[in-house]
Image (tube, rainbow, N blue to C red):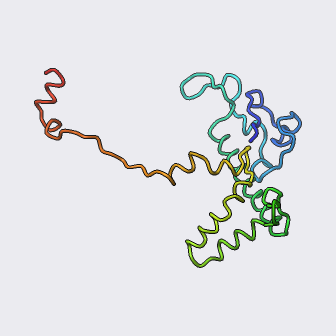
Amino acid sequence: METTAEQQAYSTDTRKFSDACLADGIHKVFTDSPITVRMTLKDLCYRGKGFLGQHGKETKTSWDTLSYTLIQGHNVYQHMVAVQEANRKYDSGVIPSMLMNNTFEHIEIRNIVDEIFAQKDRQKSLDLIEQYKNYWMQIKAGQGFSGKKVVNALSQFNALFTEEESEPETDEEELDSDDAINEALGE
């Protein structure tokens, strides 16, 4: 995740959002969405210097609620496009190296997933998932995580322990007694 334009000085900037972000070096690469293709920099950075918020104090950020909504819409759109493109490439035979196990034999994740979903019995599917557990550990995920992070103390807690909610022990008689309440209040 990268930060994007967020300066109060941009509150009067009428340049197209993506053009301004590239020109000012905010992003090295930027792909427009149907939202950002119509957006100027000042659409996102609405609050300028001296803008007073709802409590009458100058705001520290140039963004308002609509700014966050615009960026969220752009990000959701771009995420969907990226997933669709990844699926198209995968379906055409382009397999990322992180999904290949070349240690002993050539295995593609698509074959494992197909085999898991082809099972008619849920337990057989779960057994296959367990059988390939070392394979899952090799898969690298985004944000610096690797498959090894999938099996850790936090993820294993629910598999190893069950938590029971206990109710605090109370003396119902004491709670129902007006005398006890008055005594506790010093009355």
Residue that appears at 77% across and 47% down: 36
Residue that appears at 17% across and 41% down: 172
Position of 41 compared to 160: left or right?
right
- Please say if 136 is above or below 105: above
Residue that appears at 18% across and 25% down: 184
Q: What x and y, as percent, mark residue 31?
A: 83, 49
The image quarter containing residue 93 is bottom right
Most extreme residue toward the front, as rendered? 104
Disc count in the image?
A: 0
Position of 174 compared to 159: left or right?
left
Residue that appears at 70% across and 23% down: 49
The image quarter containing residue 6 is top right
Q: What x and y, as percent, mark residue 71?
A: 70, 44
For the N terminus, the image quarter is: top right
Q: What x and y, as percent, mark residue 11?
A: 74, 31
Position of 87 compared to 28: left or right?
left
Decide which of 112, 93 is in the foreground and name it: 112
For the C terminus, the image quarter is: top left
The image quarter containing residue 50 is top right
Q: What x and y, as percent, mark residue 171?
A: 18, 38
- Please say if 34 is above or below 60: below
- Please say if 112 is above or below 183: below
Decide which of 126, 76 is in the foreground and name it: 126
